[in-house]
Amino acid sequence: MNRTQILLLSVVASALLFSCGGNTASPLMGEGDTIPMRYAKNITMVRYGDCVEVTLKNPWGEGLLGSYILTSDPDAIPPYEGGTPVITTPLKNALVFTAVHCGLICEFGMEESIGGVCEKEYIHGLTKEVVDCGNGMSPNQERIIQLRPDAMLVSPFESNTGHDKLGQLGMPIIECAEYMESTALGRAEWMKFYGLLFGKEKEANAMFDALVAKYDSLSALVKKSDKRPRILSEELYGNVWYQPGVHSTIGQLYADAGAQTAFPEYTQSGSVPLSAEQVYAAAHDADVWLMRYDSDTSQTLAELGAQSDIYRRFDAFKQGNVWGCNTRTSRFYERSPFHPDRMLSDIIQITHPEVGIKEPMYFYKKLK
């Protein structure tokens, strides 16, 4: 039996011991102080002295997605069986599954707390060596055991059962489900939770307050405008062309930017799968086309038009009003979730140039 197998057996044994407790109640007693959350609906945090109890609502159904007790002094928690996991903060050796959370942690100035990542080839901006724990949907358990992270930050999915095996390792799993919030500011507000995890509560609060102030000031610039440009979104993916619902995060960003999706009849909070013919019928005369792509170089109108004959028939294409976000060079996925003010600025500059915002575009460039 090699060293890794011995470690695996010991970790699984400890996890089984941990799971034997039948008491699921919190050890924290008395009346706590709720940490205000202005926009986020799926997370609640209550402070009890030096401890914070966090509960995450299950965004796909009833009950909770997860719950945690965060404390810098775990010895201060009364002994109890099972129940809510106690996580010692600040985290010092975290395994982070996604680029977006790596980006935020680095913004906190806590890059040294990232011990490992998944899908390292998509993680940009790290200056230190970290352990690559493989694919995020089926991570390398042996490397995780050798890393022994003090917590694993994962993005949950409704039907994903791959994290069940991670739970057997006996290491805390932080369910990073902020992407299920229904508003851009609600998603960004989860940075308060991540700030607590990495000992940067004050910094996270200040960052969030600043971006809300910026977001509100930008949105106020277009409230009195009578123009509501119609936006065509994204590209064909196979035979499907996804468009954001009115109440999706993107749909609400459009509204706050004084614009609108080209499909106001779809009021969903997610994306709507449509055929190319359906999109053309409703949005051939859309004012603006915003799309994302991944490339080493900036895409051109000619390259876009060569991908599909139907693209060249849209008014936005004919008029050269197509704006692309190169997700590779702009680091869109790392930066936009916790900086919706930057996304809003881009969209307003594109749809309401008359406002005259004097700042660089963060994500989008006009295709030439």
Image (cartoon, rainbow, N blue to C red):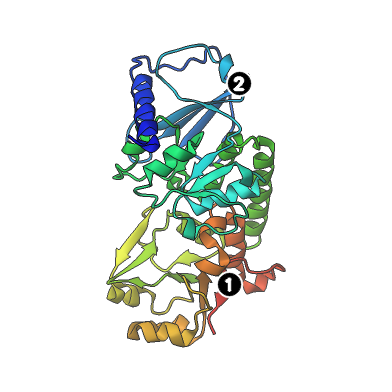
Kindly identify the residue that appears in the image at 38 percent across and 47 percent down: 139
Front residue of 260/202: it is 202
Residue 253 image offset from top left, x and y in percent = 52, 58
Q: Is residue 5 left or right of residue 85?
A: left
In the picture, residue 341 is in which quadrant?
Answer: bottom right
Q: Is residue 226 visible?
A: no
| Residue that carries the numbered disc 2 in the rendered image | 73
The answer to which image quadrant residue 67 occupies is top left
Who is closer to the viewer here, 97 or 120? 120
Q: Secondary structure at mark 1?
A: helix
Of badges 1 and 2, the one in the foreground is: 2
Residue 25's label in the rendered image is none
Q: Position of residue 32 (x, y in %)?
A: 57, 19
Q: Nearer the viewer, residue 321 or 121?
A: 121
Q: Residue at x 35, y 40 (%)?
A: 163
Of labels 1 and 2, earlier in sequence is 2
Residue 342 in view (yes/no): yes
Q: Amino acid at mark 2?
A: Asp
What residue is at 55 percent from the left and 47 percent from the top?
Answer: 188
User: As displayed, is residue 76 above or below residue 177?
Assistant: above
- Which structural element holds mark 2? loop
Tell me which amino acid carries mark 1.
Answer: Ile
Whole-percent x, y for residue 190 in the image? 54, 41
Image quadrant in which the C terminus is located:
bottom right
Residue that label 1 marks: 350
Quote the CA–CA distance across marks 1 and 2: 50 Å
As drawn, 330 above or below 73: below
Give the total number of marks visible in the rendering. 2
**Label 2 CA crowd tier, 10 Å (few <14, some 14–19, many 20+):** few
Check the image and name the residue furthest to the front: 1
Could you tell me which quadrant the N terminus lies in?
top left
